[in-house]
Amino acid sequence: MPQFTDELLARAAALRRRVVLSEGADPRVRAAAVRLTERGIAEVTLLGDGASAAWAAGEAPGVSVRTPAEDPQLGAVAALLAERKPDKVASREAARALAADPLRFAAGLVALGEADAAVGGATHTSAAVLRAALWAVGPAPGVTTVSSSFYMVTAGYGVLTFADCGVVQYPTAPQLCDIALAATRDRRRIVGDVPRVAFLSHSTRGSAEGDSVRRVREALERFRAAAPDVAADGELQGDAALVPEVAARKAAGGALAGDANVLIFPDLDSGNIAYKLVQRIAGALALGPVVQGLARPCCDLSWGATADDVVLVAAIAVLQSAHS
C-alpha cells in the first residue's frame, strides 16, 4: 500500500498542477492543504471562512486563500453559471449569489482554467458536489453518464477499480458500458497499468438468468464494440473475476483468466456494499469516490475522510487533469 500511494503522490507532484479545495472551514481540509503544499504535490487554493489569510501566513505560507463572495472572479463564475444554465438564474444578483457557494465557485475556477482540479465533499453530500461540477464543468465530450469509482488498494489483489459505487443507482446496459469505459480511461491515468474489465453478476456465464443478468451481458457486448482493445468478460461472479483457479472452472477460455483489475458492479447497492466490506473487513485502502466522465476533474470526498485521504484524492484529481 505505501508503495502505490507514494508513487501516486510522486507522479502528481511531477505535473505541478493547481488544486482548489472548497471546504476550508474543515480542519481536515486545512491540514491537507498544508501537506499538499509542503510536499510539493500541488499548488493549493483554499476556500471558506475557516481559512483566513492570517492563518495561511502563519501555518501555510504556500497556500492561497480566497473568499468566493469577495473574490475578483465572482463575476466571471456567475457569468459562466448563467451561460450554462440560464433557466436556473433569475438575475445578475442571483447568479452572483449562486457563484458565491464554495462548491460552485471551486468548480467554476476549474471551468475557467484558473485551477486544474477541484476537491470537495468532506462536509457536503456527493449529490451537492456532483451538481456543482455538472453545472460549471459538465460532462466530457461524448459522455452521457457521469459516474464514480473507488481505487481499492489491497494486500492480496493489488489495486482494484470498483465502479460505480456512488452515483448511478440502477444503471441501464448503456450506462454500465459508459461506467466501464470511464473506469478504463481513468485507470490508465491513475494506476498506469493495463485495464482488465470484469462485468460482475450473481451469475457466471449463464449459471443463472434474470433481468440483471441480461443487462450485464448487453453491457459487455456494448463495451467490446466500443473498446475492442481492452480485455473484458462477463457475466462473472466475483471469484471467477479474481481467482485463476475458479475462472478455469467457471469461465474457461475467457479473456481475463481470473486476473481482472476493473470490477463493474450491476448496481449501486452491490458496488457500495462491496467497497465498504472490502475496506473494513479486508483492511483495504479505499481511495475515492473518484468522479468519472467530467470535462475537467472535480473530485468528491467521503464524510469520514482524513486529511491524508484528502491529499490522496487531490493527487488523483491532478492525475485526471493530465488528460482533461
Image (cartoon, rainbow, N blue to C red):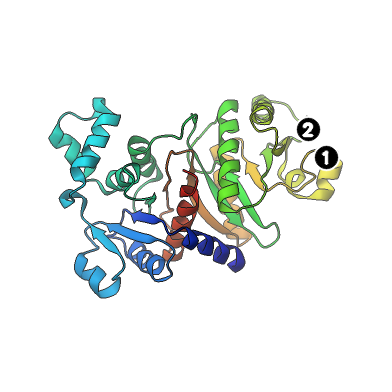
For the point 42% across and 67% down, the residue is 40
Residue sitting nearer the eye, 238 or 54: 54
* Disc number for residue 185: none
Q: Amino acid at mark 2?
A: Arg
Measure how far apart labels 2 and 1 are at the Cα level: 8 Å
Rate crowding at label 1 as few (under 14), some (14 to 19) or many (20 or more) other CA atoms within 10 Å: many
- Which quadrant, please, contains the N terminus? bottom right
In the image, residue 36 sits, relative to residue 70, either above or below, namely below
* Disc number for residue 250: 1
Judged from the image, the secondary structure of the residue bearing numbered disc 1 is: helix
Tell me: 269 left or right of 246: left
x and y percent of residue 276 in the render?
A: 56, 52
Mark 2 or mark 1, earlier in chain: 2
Rendering quarter of residue 238? top right
For the point 66% across and 45% down, the residue is 195
Do labels 2 and 1 touch, CB within 8 Å? yes
Tell me: 277 left or right of 297: right
The residue identified by callout 2 is 205
